[in-house]
Amino acid sequence: MNYYVERTIRALLTVWLVITLTFGMIRLLPGGPLVQLRAELSRQGYSASRINALIENYQNVQPDQPLYVQYFDYVTSLLQGDLGQSITNPNSVASIIGDALPWTMFIMITSVILIFAIAIVWGAVMAYREGSTFDMASSSVSILLGSMPFYVLAIGLVVLFSYKFQILPARYRTSPGVEAGLSVKFVVDALRHAALPIASLVITGAGLQALAMRGNSISVLGEDYVRVARLRGLSDRRISTRYVARNAILPMYTGFLTLIGFYFGGSPILEEVFTYPGIGYYLFQALENRDYPLMMGIFLVITIALVLSVYIADLTYGKIDPRIKSGESSEAY
């Protein structure tokens, strides 16, 4: 089967399994969210018919219908972009996610790009200076930063830069009164509010990736074709850019794409620390308030983001490593 067709089918099957598991988790487990929601509405004095109507509105299913009918209605609504109605927010789940998702994507994608850039340069320099004081000091710093949870650093940055020196804002996406638009004032204000969340991810994430780049570069530097290039008298700059860098970056490529999906999973803690209203912040609020439609909608979006990251990595990996087309290389991840 064609490589791209196979990966596309696998990605679609994964998303379908996630949708099915999401449907099953909230309906089939004893004492699940729907049962608790029904009990909570009952305690508030709603009649049985009114409870059924509310659950139908929240989940896009009719509770008194057979399970396969509920499943069909649920999938049909998802395909139409209807994720139901939030219990605690007057807006629909799709509307909340549509407003919050671009802000979270901005934080995550910017962080991963910066991590990628810093790790490549830092790791390559460590490899070329293997065994030097710089290499040993950098390795120690990388391990130290990599072992630190990003939310611990985030709290420290808030205390230092927001409360002690009052250089950067500690919360929200923009300052009150700043309207969204293509204006310098809005862009600068949004960047100032995003600076600390991005710094938390970059500082704690770049170290370990730099160590990975160091290991890959040292491995490539020992290859026969690099020795042959040196014997041919090629310059170090040409060897480092055309022979070493490309082959050392190759194993890290898919890891950085999947890192975006991984950071989406960690967004609830990060955005709660900075009160940054992205999808992670709303997921945390949904967990606290037992807002199950919003919770499951955001969970589905985060899962699809991870699947999409792996899918893009699969499709583009063959462009970088031609061996994947002939089956001489392993999968992209």
Image: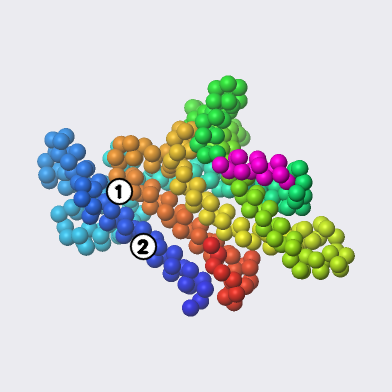
Disc 1 is placed on an element classified as loop
Toward the viewer: 270 or 180? 270
Could you tell me residue 264's position as x and y percent? Answer: 47, 47
Disc 2 is placed on an element classified as helix
Residue 237 inside the magenta-drawn segment: no
Q: Amino acid at mark 2?
A: Trp
Query: Residue at (23%, 55%) from the top-left corner?
Result: 28
The residue that disc 1 covers is 84
Q: Is residue 134 left or right of residue 262?
A: right
Q: Is residue 262 left or right of residue 87?
A: right
Q: In the rendered structure, which disc, 1 or 2, sits on the residue that comes first in sequence?
A: 2
What's the magenta bit mostly, secondary-structure-wise? helix
Structural distance between the alpha carbons of marks 1 and 2: 18 Å
Residue 140 inside the magenta-drawn segment: yes
Residue 117 showing in the rendered view: no
Furthest-top residue in this view = 164
Region in magenta: 135-147
Could you tell me residue 94's position as x and y percent? Answer: 37, 47
- The local crowd at label 1, few if under 14, some if 14 to 19, many if 20 or more residues have their Cα within 10 Å, is many
Q: Nearer the viewer, mark 1 or mark 2?
A: 2
On residue 16, the disc is: 2
